[in-house]
Image (cartoon, rainbow, N blue to C red):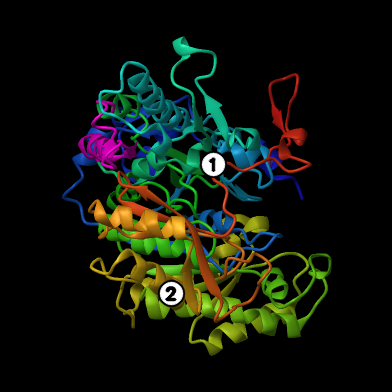
Amino acid sequence: MQSDIEIANAAVLRPIREVAAETLGIAEEHLVPYGHYKAKVDIGYLTSLADRPLGKLVLVTALSPTPPGEGKTTTTVGLTDALHGLGHRTVACLREPSMGPVFGMKGGAAGGGWSQVVPMTDINLHFTGDFAAIAAANNLLSALIDNHVHHGNELDIDVRSVTWKRVLDMNDRALREVTVALGGHANGFPRSEGFDIVVASELMAIFCLTESWADLKNRIGDIVIGYDRSTKPVTARDLDAHGAMAALLRDALAPNLVQTIEGAPAFVHGGPFANIAHGCSSVMATRAGLRLADIVVTEAGFGADLGAEKFVDIKCRKSGLRPDVAVVVATVRALKYHGGVALADLGTEDLDAVDAGMVNLRRHLSNIRDVYGIQPVVAVNRFPTDTDDEIARVVELVAEEGVRAFPATHFADGGAGAKDLAEGVLAALEGESAYDFSFTYDDEMSLTEKVEAIATRLYGAGLVTWDAKARRRLQRIERDGYEKLPVCVAKTQYSFSTDPTSLGAPSGHELHVREVRLSAGAGFVVVVCGDMMTMPGLPRDPSASRIDLADDGTILGLS
């Protein structure tokens, strides 16, 4: 089979104005084109649709990720193509890829095989410049902080307390901890600093949760950059930074419209980390899709304990959106891996390992039904090494949980390979749900209680412990009036615990909190557990070493 980039480069794309008009009813005058095949949809036009009823929302999530990959984005695209092919006005809503993973370990994030969004190379690289705008606005605030201190520090900022970091959309471990303003008085006041990757910035989370320019500017103004010497929070508004930062993001806030290989529309907009932030594409794009289409298929990052939890407890809580169905992506390989099979042996049939690994999927299904109150459907993303008996066993085990599972071959067959899955999703959408949507915790609970609710209800943890520094930071956040915010737990995506090697469904373990961060503008508190990095490093053999530019201008090696 051809590689992802070979398939994408050979795809025959339709002009984006035709896709917009024929699939979503958007006239050309409401598009801001970026070439022939991608465009932003005018915010003023989207605002004019406020009275339209919303379509159905399908959330794609997954079991706990494994090294071979589960194909969540690929399934989102394949399901969109299948529903589109069945005659339903459907749009996909996806996150924009970060160039850090593109050139690092993960590679691109535009789907795979015959279920991709295109133009794939554009989407995976500079796209429409949204991430560059976010980086510029973020770093403007950093510059204004240091400039304020240099010119007399009227706000009496305690430079030791500054939490705002500069950002770069690239994996670069050497920038995790740096010292700025060296070289003498003319260069400012020296202090310790650091860089995050753009997708870990609070500004990215704000960008994906806002729904208007006015709200964007207000949220940016609420950003707490650090504290003064009397321990009072200092905000971006105090520095008069919010107006200029919002101006840099004016055009970026409009959702990006592209297409799938099969011509279905897709909004690809925003891309916060799925552990440090909430891991979902923008509310702007999701609501636009719900007003323009009958069905929106969107995804949340990593497994249902991370991405789906943040989709529910942060994105849904703040936007009022509610998923009608949750599609949980599973693979035979992932189940066998959680069942104890070594990575090298996943291609060998092992029904016992499938049975053992089902404990992971079973807990995710329980969380989706019993905690979030969403009707689940399982997509069994089939790989060539899967045997018929293994596929049948997964379907049988899922059925024992009262849930329907649908094998799908959309990677190799495009939308046609997800037809059964699409029909299963349609049946779930048309039927009456037996569940009532709910959050994991109530707003009125303390921050500590919210973390404990997530740990015990979703992760199966026995207790939550705190570093002394993290506990003090939490108390300061509560003292400053932020105790009603939701929490965003940052931990490894590979396990329900903080130990990435603890597979399956561990129970009774300890969730240890080592750091607490306030994202006041985004409107949540980040609780960091385990060894989480907000500036990843490159692996020994980075994907960048396989990416090239041919003499005719064709990009090669992108996956």
**Magenta stretch holds residue 227:** yes
Q: Quadrant of the C terminus?
A: top right
Q: Residue at x 69, y 26 (%)?
A: 554
Q: From the top left corner, tell me how far across and down residue 218 is, in percent.
A: 22, 38
Amino acid carrying label 2: it is Ile
Amino acid carrying label 1: it is Pro
Q: Residues within 10 Å of mark 2 (few under 14, many from 20)?
A: many
User: Does residue 76 appear in the picture of this structure?
Assistant: yes
User: Does residue 482 appear in the picture of this structure?
Assistant: no
State which quadrant residue 345 falls in. Answer: bottom right
Q: Residue at x 24, y 51 (%)?
A: 480
Horizontal side, residue 202 vs residue 499: left or right: left
Q: Which residue is mark 2?
A: 368
Residue found at the far bottom of this picture: 400
* First-in-chain label (1 vs 2): 1
- Could you tell me how far apart the alpha carbons at marks 1 and 2 are, in whole angstroms? 26 Å
Residue found at the far left of this picture: 51
Helix, strand or loop under label 1: loop
Q: Residue at x 49, y 49 (%)?
A: 273
Q: Which residue is mark 1?
A: 97
Residue 395, numbered label: none
Whether 181 is drawn above or below 204: the answer is above
